[in-house]
Amino acid sequence: MILDLECRNPAELREDWLPLLHTAADAAQKTEGVAIPLAVHVLITDDEEIHRVNREQRKIDRATDVLSFPAVAYPPSRHAANAQELLEQEYDPDYGAAYLGDIVISMDHVRAQAQEYGHSLERELCYLLVHGLFHLFGYDHMEENDKRLMREMEEKTLSDIKVEPYDRNELIARAKAAMEYSYSPYSHYRVGACLLGKSGKMYTGCNIENAAYGAVNCAERTALFKAVSEGEREFTAIAVATEKFLGWPCGICRQALYEFAPDLMVIVACKDEVDSMPLKELLPHGFGAAPDKLGKE
């Protein structure tokens, strides 16, 4: 797919995001199953401009995250995959492809929603692009069945591209900040952790030692117990920060985390060195609570 990108503030669009956005667009076209060349214009701007566009074009007086303006008028129950003759009518010689329409994305909303949901900026930007593309393919979410179908297509597309659903650097930064509160007078080994819940909320913890060594609590479990005590039951990733060398969770922490999140991504960081591994690989053949038991007394 030809992605004609325009950005009002080019400094906001990182160069390493460009290949990812093109990959997301190609993945969306593949998911939809359209074989002919397609083109779309994407404007990346701010809340002020998207507010103006929304007001002028849709008579809605507010800013939003993404707007789509399809070039094709699809009949009911038809989408791009089964309306190729309509797409061909939109052939644009300047692109050498069928022109799908325009997408407008607000970076202000990208940043706010990434923070709210605990996503990386790349993931949120890719999601909004993909969401906009499926509108251009003829999908909508006004009715529940339509919404479910559109969401399935979006999730399939996002699963085909390599983009972390969370901001790894933010998790590491918070883990390092938590490490400063470590109480470790015996081992002198400071550890901090940041655990990301599926709600998007982040929970931090540090290791807390005790003269009775058996009473020591690791940073990972401090963060986990804090999260569970506040009602969180599902988790996406955890970052663990140390000072001397990469520190992977101990066996007890692996088991404690596995109880709630066997699919958890574990990220370890020490100074500028970073590594990661799924919890299932750190605790092979692990066991935990049945999913329907989580959150129940």
Image (tube, helix red, strand yellow):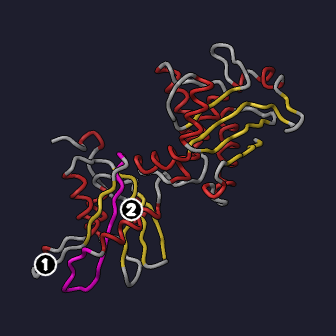
Quadrant in which the N terminus appears: top right
In the image, residue 187 lies in the stretch drawn in magenta: yes
Q: Residue furthest left?
A: 212
Is residue 123 positioned above or below 135 on the image?
below
Q: Mark on residue 119? A: none
**Badge 1 density bin: few <14, some 14–19, many ≥20, Cα 10 Å:** few
- As measured in the structure, the alpha-carbon distance from the residue carrying label 1 to the one carrying label 2 is 30 Å
Q: Magenta stretch? A: 181-199
Q: Answer with left or right where residue 275 lies relative to residue 196.
A: right
Percent x, y of residue 140: 57, 24
In the image, residue 253 lies in the stretch drawn in magenta: no
Q: Main secondary structure of the magenta part?
A: loop
Q: Answer with left or right where residue 9 lies relative to residue 261.
A: right
Percent x, y of residue 266: 41, 63
Say which residue label 2 marks. Answer: 284
Residue type, numbered disc 1: Asn
Percent x, y of residue 264: 39, 56
Say which residue label 1 marks. Answer: 210
Residue type, numbered disc 2: Pro
Is residue 230 positioned above or below 37 on the image?
below
Q: In this orientation, which residue lies closer to the viewer: 60 or 148?
A: 60
Percent x, y of residue 270: 42, 78
**Badge 2 density bin: few <14, some 14–19, many ≥20, Cα 10 Å:** few
Residue at disc 1, secondary structure: loop
Residue at disc 2, secondary structure: loop
| Residue located at (28% from left, 61% from top) | 255
| Residue located at (46% from left, 51% from top) | 119
| Residue located at (39% from left, 53% from top) | 236
